[in-house]
Amino acid sequence: PEPEPEGESVMAGDTYTIAVTLEGGSGRASVESPAKLRYSETGVCWATIVWSSSNFDYMKVDGVKYELLSAQGSSTFEIPVAAFDQKLDVIADTVAMSEPHEVAYTLFFDSASLQKQ
């Protein structure tokens, strides 16, 4: 399903929250839920992902690298969301070990939880 609220006309700049679940990795990291969503002028839905750790320095979605927005107690990124109610494969690079490691995760955005802000 396209990432657009049902029955609503979405305008650029509209913001929402949505429940997000994380799978993969060692199971020690988590992400804040609900996550913030915003719609850009180009119709792209962007999710703000806030990790439980400050040790992530970038994320990749569909091979595109997204840089760290903030590391104030946690690592924060803004990534595109192509669809709700499907697993989104992402890579997060952690610097918590002796050398940086890319770790595969999946994020799931639950459209039933979507709320306009």
Image (cartoon, grey):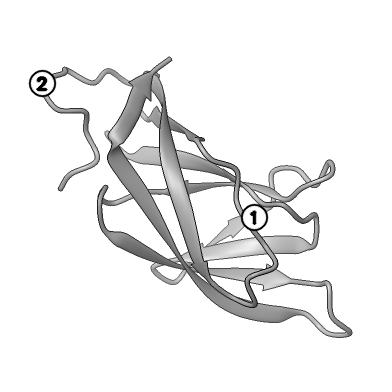
What is the three-letter code of the residue carrying label 2? Gly
What is the three-letter code of the residue carrying label 1? Glu
- Tell me which numbered mark, 2 or 1, is placed earlier along the sequence: 2
Disc number lying in front (2 or 1): 2
- Which residue is pictured at 35% across the width and 22% down the height? 115
Q: Residues within 10 Å of mark 1 (few under 14, many from 20)?
A: some
Q: Is residue 27 above or below residue 98?
A: above
Give the image location of residue 5, x and y in percent: 21, 28
Q: Secondary structure at mark 2?
A: loop
- Which residue is pictured at 77% across the width and 47% down the height? 74
Locate residue 115 relative to residue 72 in the image: left or right: left
Q: Residues within 10 Å of mark 2 (few under 14, many from 20)?
A: few
Which quarter of the picture shows residue 102?
bottom right
Q: Secondary structure at mark 1?
A: strand
Residue 102 in view (yes/no): yes
Residue bearing the label numbered 1: 67
Of 40 and 47, the residue lying toward us: 47
Whether tag 2 and tag 1 are in contact, CB under 8 A, the answer is no
